[in-house]
Image (tube, rainbow, N blue to C red):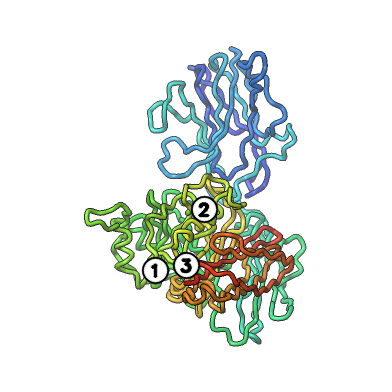
Amino acid sequence: MPRETFEIISRPERFIAGEPVTITFRYIAGDEGLTVGSKLKLGLPSAGWGEPLVNHKRHWEIDPADARKWLHYRRLNTTFDIESATGAFLEPYARHEQRPGDKRCIQRWWITFEVIGADLAPGDTVTITYGDTTWGETGCSVQPVVEPKGDFSLFVQPPDYAAPGEEGIREVPGSPVWVAVEAGPAARALLRLPTVSAAGDAPQPRVYPMDRCCNPAQGDAPTIRPRIEVLGDVLRPTADAPGITLETQPSIEQNDPREFIFWGDMHGKTSFSGDGLAPIDDYLGYARDVAGADFTCVTDHSGCNRESWITTQEKAVEYTRDGEFVALKGFEFSWTHGHRNVYFDNHEIEDVWPGERLVLELAPDGTRPFFEYLRGRKHELVSIPHHTLVWTDWDIYDQELEPICEIYSMWGCSERPIGAGNPLWDKSCIPGGGAQAALARGYRIGFTAASDSHSGFPGRQHPDLYGFCFSYKSGLAAIRAPELTAKALIDAVKARNCYGTTGARIYVEFAVNGARMGSELPGEMLHEPRTITGRVVGTAPVARIDIVRNNEDWQTLLPDRDDASFELTDEEPIAAGSYYYLRAWQTDGEMAWASPVWVG
């Protein structure tokens, strides 16, 4: 009798991140065959692999039960052939699901084939081609994230299988098939200068090469000799590097600067979290050595457990060199009322695991334990809500403890709902969610941006796609501080002296009557003319600048140049608690949001 088997019968020699591939799998039914209603479930290693586009039935045909009548105007890159002694056929669909038996919050692509028409007989063969080029496609893309060990898996689900967690679904012999995803050769390079530099310092550009998907490049490093172009007070690194895409940034020369702009991504997971991929050293090393960040933070869920929390704190100490690179100490707190990250201004290693205090429900005494935990340590920490369009209940918020929110990440932009003009969001929006909803309530909340990387690549300028909800590339936080230390960074966040971008190192100034972003002006300004000033120096031409007043686009400028300054006057009386903030758009789609300034 035939043995049930699963195997890959055709594949590339190597899987290079982001490259198109064609892979052919074969399943042979065992001595019991498969009954009608059974399902073959082929799992790809992650949600980052190219979407499987399967056949679709033409339901308006005279005989809609005939599965051989397929649509031919839908894109198709995943096909199957069946050799059956009984005339059995398959009906496919593809969607994100978790691996059977995997309790982690990690979803991947699953291609499901339901047996229809007749049972699969013993020895019947199903051949599946993922990345089929027959129908005009170039193949399916390998996930953009380097991973040393990922699996293609095949399961059989019986017709009476009801829900994950129940007995019955089984893995086919030969599954899983393990593969490695490797980085490609250098194809991109980041050219970095301090965003603010002292006149006469002559800073030297730093070069960070990477592959096309922003992984650490494989092979010999390219020869890139950077130079600096000067236009007025703006320095820009550039280089002659054939075949390499350069990402550059402006540096603003100032006489005796008292405040600098530091860039980092302080939101991401390591393998300590159930849904994280990379070891903590890989995470911190990527931020410092590949992304060229000034600071970062590991924010594993609730510190995960006592052992990992201690390790996380120790690693923050190990990687921090004040003035060069800061690994902040922190953790994420996730609750049904919203997700927050907590950041400390010091590197003291504590034995107490914070997890026991992380509850947002009301306690019998009317307090919320999480806020009480924060309040007892408010001199040394800050909390930042994130994904506020999908998670946050603004009824449960503390202004004193949460001065800013994360306005952009790999999830997208949480400024406002899609219908209000948000081009960087592809999910549902919780009623009353988003940064503008918080501002409308009178909350005085500033802005930052990050990634929420689960693959271990903080600051990555390419979408991870590793999780089903990560549609965008990493954002970056820009913190204005006098020095690069944990204390100075957190003090600046508490003062809302910060802004966020979609990842480009855009220079932003914004002030009302001379008061910088994050400030509060006295009430006598409500009925006097207010002068709004700013400057945006882009990494590409600045296409548009919106000055937002009380959540309405009050003024829109269309500068279409790299360096755009403005001065506007608002003579209209405004209500107490009114606010202004800046939203900037570049011609390449990059964006920035400056923290608001409040009046009264």
Q: Marks 3 and 2: CB-CB under 8 Å? A: no
Give the percent coordinates (x, y) of residue 325: 51, 72
Q: Which amino acid type is marked by label 3? A: Gly
Q: Is residue 65 left or right of residue 309?
A: right
| Mark before the other along the chain sequence, 3 or 1 | 1
Residue picked out by circle 1: 344
Q: Can residue 12 be seen?
A: yes
- State the residue at coordinates (46%, 30%): 171
The picture places residue 597, in percent across and down from the top left corner, at: 52, 70
Residue 509 in the figure: left or right of residue 526: right
Q: Residues within 10 Å of mark 3 (few under 14, many from 20)?
A: many
In the shown orientation, is residue 176 left or right of residue 13? Answer: left
Amino acid on which disc 2 is placed: Ser
108 shown above or below 214: above
Local crowd size for mark 1, using a 10 Å CA cut-off: few (<14), some (14–19), many (≥20): many
Q: Position of residue 176 (x, y in %)?
A: 51, 36
Secondary structure of the residue carrying numbered label 2? loop
Q: Label 3 belongs to which residue?
A: 577
Report, in whole angstroms, how far the alpha carbon at label 3 lies from the one at label 1: 29 Å
| Residue at horizontal 53 percent and vertical 27 percent from the top | 40
Q: Residue 288, can we see it?
A: no
Image quadrant of residue 46?
Answer: top right
Q: Which residue is mark 2?
A: 455
Examine the rendered structure and indicate whether residue 220 appears above or below residue 139: below
Q: Nearer the viewer, residue 450 or 370?
A: 370
Precedes in sequence: disc 3 or disc 2: 2
| First in residue order: circle 2 vs circle 1 | 1
